[in-house]
Image: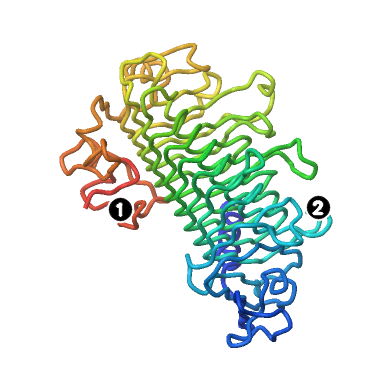
Amino acid sequence: MQRKLAIAAALLLVAFAGTSALGGTYYVATNGSDSNPGSSTQPWLTLQHAVDTIANGDTILVKPGTYNGCRIRYTAAAGSPKTLAAETAGTVLINAPGALAYRPSCIEVIHDDHGYTPVDYWVIDGFEVTSSPKWGIDAILANHLTVTNNVAHNNGSLGMYTGIHLAFGDYMLVENNTSYSNTEHGLYCNNGADYGIARNNTLYSNGSMGFHMNGDSEQEGSDGIMTDWLVEKNKSYNNTTNGFDGDGVEYTTWKNNLTYGNVSKSLHLFVLNGEVNPRYLRIVNNTFINKTGSYYVLNFYLNKKTSKLPGGNDNKIFNNILYHYETTNTMRGSIMGVSTWMSTWESDYNLVVDRFAVNDNKTKYTLAQWRSTYGLDLNSTLCLDLTQAVVDAANDDYHLKATGPAVNAGTTLTDVTDDIEGTSRPQGTAYDIGCYEYH
């Protein structure tokens, strides 16, 4: 009960951080002046002046145009967040760091002293961010940060850098963003950040992963563990490595997500830089599609160097489409587990191919062998042809066919009340499998 109350409080705080208390509204425009009062008719000129000037509860609206970015360095307060927003989403382009950029990135939420002082309760909303030398949007120790409705693309000209990067902060909300063609990840949350939500983001064609989560104990101030995240209703596709990735992640849920076309895995769970093996995870009602040449769809991995760390236990996998196009390849399959972790796992009511494995593919199983060895997936459904289950796999339409094997084939899950598009579950006699509910 104590953990449930803590999770409920965390989600409430994340939601509350995105609501603005009554405050002033100020404007920035390409024809403004920082000596102006910041009104609609006499706007400021630079984002940096704006974010340095406003008080708790105030909102900055940026008029259409192209701007240099800014470094947000002064915190707001609970109940009175500060907001930096495009007046009209999609009309404001930020394509270079600001004069005070620290990293340098286009939008930074970082205090003067290398991020050791929190910069909390900010909202960043509605910008197109591109051509950054490093990160597009970059936050360090920004608790209760909301990043929403932004488009981050083609960032990282100086190396491998992410479209949206959020480190250390707790209670962050990352929602309705699109991040693509960045040199590293689409979205990267790391350094022990806890109690976050990543929802309704579209992440594609990035140089590494769609969404990477990393406990990262090597960084000073990080406990190496990512705890209590909700990752839901995201699309992650055509990325150079994995759709989703978790290093040192616990008590986290992935639900109603869609992946396809990623080079390696749909969801990869392990510990390398973190301090706990994946444990107490819920992986429910996702559609994970792996293309030819990729590895296992859902991959759990035990690193020998970190094998003595705790975890690996009590993971639950229900109502997922876990399809691999290489249905007969013994190096490819639906689930890769770790043999010493399996006794506490639950996995069932999934749509799968006839291949499973443990211990980095050292031991392989058919579905029948998987069932008899571990007692898992007893009610899961074998699918050797995805076209029988979805509307148009060739064109990446993974809505369900009315008579397909995923319809009414799932189990009831109290924490999954709708699908990726908001359609309530169930529509038929039982839950459907995958991120889409047929209706």
**Can the viewer see residue 138?**
yes
Q: Which residue is mark 2?
A: 114
Circle nearer the N terminus (2, 1): 2
Residue at image x 69%, y 86%?
A: 37
Placement of 6 over or under 22, stated as above or below = above
Question: Residue 174, position in %: x, y?
Answer: 55, 56
Q: Can you tell which quarter of the image residue 279 is in?
A: top right
Residue nearest the viewer, comparing 303 with 96: 96
Q: Is residue 188 above or below residue 90?
A: above
The picture quadrant where one finds residue 137 is: bottom right
Residue 194 visible, this orientation: no
Q: Say how many tags the image has.
A: 2
Decide: few, some or many residues near mark 2? Use Cα within 10 Å; few <14, some 14-19, many ≥20.
few
Q: Residues within 10 Å of mark 1 (few under 14, many from 20)?
A: many
Q: Position of residue 64 (x, y in %)?
A: 52, 72
Question: Residue at label 1?
Answer: 425
* Cβ atoms under marks 2 and 1 closer than 8 Å: no
Q: In this image, 379 relative to 134: left or right?
A: left
Left or right: where does residue 397 sit relative to residue 172? left
Left or right: 286, with 299 as reference point: left
Residue 317, image quadrant: top left
